[in-house]
Amino acid sequence: MPEFIEFTRNYSDLSTGQGFQWEFHCERCGNGYRSKFQASATGVVTQALDTASSLLGGVFGKAADLSNRVQSATWERAHDKAFGEAAQEVRHLFVQCPNCNAWVCRDRCWNEDRGLCHNCAPDVGVRVASAQAEAISEQAVEKVRERQYKVDQYVEGDDKRASCPKCGASLKAGAKFCPECGARVEEKRFCIECGAALADKAKFCPECGTKQE
């Protein structure tokens, strides 16, 4: 085990009094690897003494207290040793980028050809494919916008309903009654010329005088 451990920030300590375990994560994608659980000898002994003390009415209470006092230093040493072993276990799965110093996973976030992480040296093929997909999406939207649609029934100010105001059931376009509960669907009318609100049976717009179809 090396005297010094390289990982100082890209891990989460999952250790408990019963044993040691860590998760080492990539600083680029956030994914990572979990080390194997290592049982703590001091944790097992302390748990056994606590159980005996509880069963025998405190006969082993002093022994358990002494174990707890000794455990802190012993546990810390065992914890450091176990961490060093866990770090060595996953070390080959990570690379530290010489440009940004981030620890990244070798499989997905390391550009082997450039000797840099994908943040510093992105994969050209991935970038091109992503740019193509984005361009196709943008062009498709533009083509849709260029088309002419029949929108006479969707004049400015219209507020056609998508669901029944009484029961919430979905409505088809132009529905006058709800197919579920039969409630009348109130639709406001607006002038086909100026967009002004109209009474239900108005034949002419009260604002501009345009005849309504």
Image: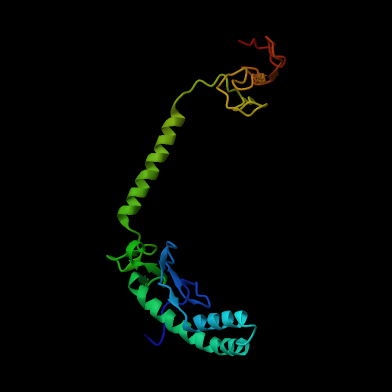
In screen coordinates, is 137 left or right of 155? left
Height in image: 209 above or below 44? above
Residue furthest out toward the front: 56
Residue 205 screen position, x and y as percent: 69, 14
Residue at x-position 50% and y-position 80%: 44
Identify which residue, 196 or 65, lies in the foreground.
65
Identify which residue, 67 or 91, lies in the foreground.
67
Height in image: 104 above or below 169? below
The type of colouring in the image is rainbow
Residue 124 screen position, x and y as percent: 31, 56
Height in image: 127 above or below 1? above
In screen coordinates, is 91 left or right of 194? left
In screen coordinates, is 80 left or right of 120? right
Q: How many marks?
A: 0
- Image quarter where the N terminus lies is bottom left
Residue 182 screen position, x and y as percent: 64, 19
- Image quarter where the C terminus lies is top right
Residue 169 screen position, x and y as percent: 60, 27
Height in image: 46 above or below 123? below
Identify which residue, 3 or 183, lies in the foreground.
183
Res 72 → quadrant: bottom right
Residue at x-position 41% and y-position 32%: 143
